[in-house]
């Protein structure tokens, strides 16, 4: 498939890394094993319960993601006064963690 100008259309999966914060609805799973700089944390309530919205820098782009992870919430609470913090998101067993 090509567009009017003859180039192939971009995939949303590739484009989401260039979108403004909050637009791409990034999940922690999208960020696994990538080093990020966490810049801001906000506790929010969603229809699924308590969550943490976090802003971060990845490859020079400012982005935002939301997580309901209890383990990450505890870690985010522990680092909240030390921001910005560089970290890598990992999945250990069934839990997401910072390392």
Image (spheres, rainbow, N blue to C red):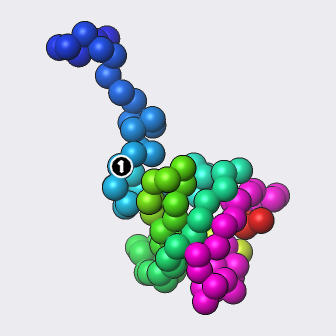
Residue 55, percent from left and from top: 48, 68
**Left/right of residue 12 with respect to residue 71 in the rendered view:** left
Identity of the residue furthest to the front in this view = 60
Report which quarter residue 35 is drawn in: bottom right
Q: Which residue is mark 1?
A: 19
**Left/right of residue 89 with respect to residue 93 in the rendered view:** left
Identity of the residue furthest to the right in this view = 93
Report which quarter residue 70 is drawn in: bottom right
Highlighted range, magenta: 72-96
Residue 26, percent from left and from top: 48, 54
**Above or below: residue 82 compared with residue 5:** below
- Residue in view at x 66 percent, y 51 percent: 34
- Residue in view at x 42 percent, y 75 percent: 46
- Residue in view at x 61 percent, y 60 percent: 36
Q: Nearer the viewer, residue 7 or 52?
A: 7
Q: Residues within 10 Å of mark 1 (few under 14, many from 20)?
A: some
């Amino acid at each position: 498939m090509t567009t009017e100008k003859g180039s192939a259309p971009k995939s949303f999966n590739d484009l989401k890394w260039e979108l403004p914060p909050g637009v791409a609805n990034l999940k922690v799973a999208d960020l696994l094993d990538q080093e990020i700089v966490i810049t801001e944390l906000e506790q929010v309530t969603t229809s699924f319960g308590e969550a943490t919205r976090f802003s971060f820098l990845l490859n020079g782009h400012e982005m935002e993601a939301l997580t309901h992870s209890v383990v990450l919430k505890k870690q985010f609470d522990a680092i909240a006064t030390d921001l910005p913090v560089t970290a890598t998101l990992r999945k250990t067993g069934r839990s997401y963690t910072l390392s």
